[in-house]
Image: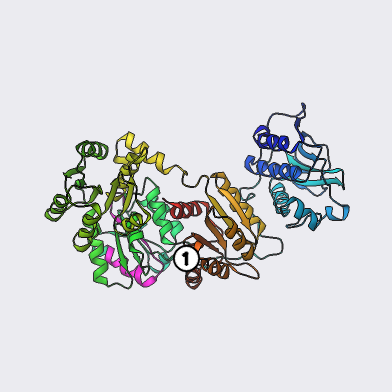
């Protein structure tokens, strides 16, 4: 652990012309029982500060048994069988005596000139002290101005702590805000979860409008399906994993998150990706829903008859039968390669070597998906897609464009309005093609051959699309910033932080590498709504994904977030699974 922490700082110290050493007392054991990630975060922050505020001399990390030096009222340390001390000592600027008592408070430093010269806000020390307390320890300081400082972290060598100990607390003196959610719909519409027998087909209804929930329960029963009801996106995946419904009806505007996140979670989870999802919403973004793997898309308001017809279509679709795939490709080697890649006993594959031939086959019989090359001898793939759009019976056919040509931005935008997915041929393209067709054919991952299951696991267990991307976290609460930053950095994301709306705007203007923003709504002076609106006023930032984080989750607040220009919203306290689902969704491709 010490080597992991120290390695990057050795290089930094060398580049600054400072000596750097790590000393481990020989009387210490080799291990300490604590939260290793949090311990590393504290030590990294202390070492980072030591190097930042030291112009010449040395920085040292010493680890030794502690014989006292902590507060008399620290129960975990006083009751510990042994205590270990991590000392970070520097020969830097030091801290005046009158400032030493407040240095652990957020945004405090020795003086403004120090801040201007060395950068930083002192935010890390406030968080480090909180984390030390959560680990059953404490952080202390000895410093002489002009000579240097020693920060000491005292920890019990064995401390599991309560299960909830590592939750980031609310700032001192602030009341904990309760997230206001509508009543559980299960209480208004008793569903069938308690009478559901193994193997019985069920519809999962994720809907916060009681009227639609009631209509959907009745429509499910009429279609021969049992019903499971929830108004929360966070509960949807748990219900699906427990009860294995045959289909889901999903509203986009939910109390705790956008339905797009629920859809993304379902399609990234191998146990649920095959479940057909019917989107039922006032949102007009039909193409986004279909491209993300939705089976069908209904706009509110709709009629009882419309809902019944849609559920009947899903019921028919999930009945056991062979799925049918059409490959529109004129190159024989590509035809063979794609056919072998996608072959499955429950899949019937047909080939068309021309655009006209493909359209004829589609009009003659039912297909569940098409793989389309853009270069066909008689007509382009763009023309094939336009013909499909004109034909009402074929307009919803999932089409995966598989092309070897580089697309212009205009062509890429045009294809995204017509096709479900675009896979550009390259080193990783066979795996992507298999993944996309399996998604749109709603193939059950566990029924696939082991090598193809491994392809899906490799693609969906990966956070490659997050690694190296830059995210801006905007929040006036230091602990929220730290909790989010820690989670994001563990996925190898680069994190920038701002504590005010104005600071966020300034960072975005100077940092074109920012790929996504996490925006707290409840900030003093300029709140998140105003900040988002100002960001959207810059033409260069109009398409930047912004996820609003709101402690309020009432429908009006959600709509206000989106009206201000947010791409998405999540309710606080933020669930990390939902957060990363949202990040993957907005950073996809």
Q: Looking at the image, can residue 570 be seen? A: no
Quarter-of-image position of residue 78? top right
- The answer to which of 252 and 340 lies nearer the viewer is 340
Task: Judge left or right: residue 444 versus residue 128.
Answer: left
Measuring from the top left, give residue 155's x and y in whole percent.
73, 41
Relative to 76, does residue 193 appear above or below in the rendering? below
Q: Is residue 280 magenta?
A: no
Measuring from the top left, give residue 394's x and y in whole percent.
20, 59
Q: Residues within 10 Å of mark 1 (few under 14, many from 20)?
A: many
Q: Looking at the image, can residue 388 be seen? A: yes
Measuring from the top left, give residue 545's x and y in whole percent.
48, 59
Q: Residue furthest left?
A: 364
The residue that appears at 39% across and 65% down in the rendered structure is 207
Relative to 221, does residue 4 appear above or below in the rendering? above
Q: Which residues are magenta?
A: 197-220
The residue that appears at 56% across and 49% down in the rendered structure is 488
Q: Which residue is mark 1?
A: 255
Relative to 524, does residue 244 appear above or below in the rendering? above
The residue that appears at 69% across and 29% down in the rendered structure is 30
Task: Judge left or right: residue 28 versus residue 532.
Answer: right
Assign a secondary structure to mark 1: loop
Quarter-of-image position of residue 5? top right
Relative to 10, does residue 69 appear above or below in the rendering? below
Q: How many marks?
A: 1
Measuring from the top left, give residue 589's x and y in whole percent.
41, 50
């Amino acid at each position: 652990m010490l080597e992991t922490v120290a390695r990057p700082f050795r290089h930094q110290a060398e580049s600054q012309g400072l000596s750097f050493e790590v000393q481990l007392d020989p009387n210490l054991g080799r291990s300490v029982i604590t939260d290793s990630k949090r311990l590393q975060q504290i030590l990294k922050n202390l070492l980072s500060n030591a190097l930042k505020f030291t112009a010449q001399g040395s920085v040292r990390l010493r680890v030794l048994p502690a014989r006292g030096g902590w507060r008399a009222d620290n129960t975990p340390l006083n009751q510990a069988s042994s205590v270990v001390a991590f000392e970070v000592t520097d020969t830097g600027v030091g801290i005046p005596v009158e400032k030493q008592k407040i240095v652990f408070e957020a945004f405090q430093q020795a003086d403004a000139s120090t801040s201007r010269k060395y950068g930083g806000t002192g935010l890390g020390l406030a968080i480090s002290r909180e984390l030390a307390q959560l680990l059953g320890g404490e952080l202390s300081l000895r410093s002489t101005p002009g000579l240097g400082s020693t920060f000491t972290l005292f920890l019990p060598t064995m401390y599991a702590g309560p299960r909830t100990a590592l939750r980031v607390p609310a700032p001192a003196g602030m009341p904990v805000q309760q997230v206001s959610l509508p009543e559980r719909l299960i209480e208004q519409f008793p569903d069938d979860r308690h009478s559901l027998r193994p193997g019985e087909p069920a519809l999962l209804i994720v809907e916060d409008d009681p009227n639609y929930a009631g209509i959907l329960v009745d429509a499910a029963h009429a279609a021969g399906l049992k019903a499971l009801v929830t108004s929360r996106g966070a509960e949807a995946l748990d219900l699906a994993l427990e009860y294995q419904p045959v289909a889901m009806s999903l509203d986009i505007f939910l109390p705790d998150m956008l339905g797009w996140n629920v859809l993304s979670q379902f399609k990234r989870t191998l146990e649920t990706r095959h479940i057909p999802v019917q989107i039922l919403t006032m949102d007009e973004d039909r193409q986004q829903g279909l491209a993300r793997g939705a089976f069908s898309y209904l706009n509110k308001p709709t009629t009882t008859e419309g809902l019944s017809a849609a559920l009947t279509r899903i019921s028919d679709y999930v009945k056991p039968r062979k799925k049918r795939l059409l490959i529109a490709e004129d190159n024989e080697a590509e035809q063979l390669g794609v056919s072998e890649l996608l072959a499955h006993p429950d899949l019937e594959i047909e080939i068309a070597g021309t655009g006209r031939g493909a359209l004829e086959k589609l009009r003659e019989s039912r297909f569940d998906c098409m793989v389309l090359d853009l270069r066909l001898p008689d007509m382009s793939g763009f023309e094939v897609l336009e013909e499909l759009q004109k034909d009402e019976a074929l307009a919803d056919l999932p089409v995966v464009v598989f092309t070897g040509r580089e697309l212009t931005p205009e062509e890429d935008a045009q294809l995204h309005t017509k096709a479900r997915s675009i896979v550009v041929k390259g080193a990783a393209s066979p795996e992507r093609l298999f993944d996309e067709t399996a998604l749109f054919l709603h193939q059950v991952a566990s029924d696939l051959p082991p090598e193809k299951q491994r392809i899906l696991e490799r693609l969906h267990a990966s956070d490659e699309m997050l690694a190296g991307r830059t995210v801006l976290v905007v929040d006036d609460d230091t602990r929220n910033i730290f909790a989010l930053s820690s989670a994001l950095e563990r996925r190898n994301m680069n994190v920038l932080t701002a504590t005010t709306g104005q600071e966020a705007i300034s960072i975005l203007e100077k940092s074109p590498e920012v790929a996504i923003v996490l925006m707290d709504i409840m900030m003093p002076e300029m709140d998140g709504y105003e900040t988002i609106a100002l960001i959207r006023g810059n033409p260069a930032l109009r398409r930047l994904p912004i996820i609003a984080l709101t402690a309020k989750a009432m429908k009006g607040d959600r709509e206000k977030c989106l009206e201000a220009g947010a791409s998405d919203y999540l309710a606080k306290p933020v669930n990390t699974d939902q957060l990363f689902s949202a990040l993957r969704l907005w950073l996809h491709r």
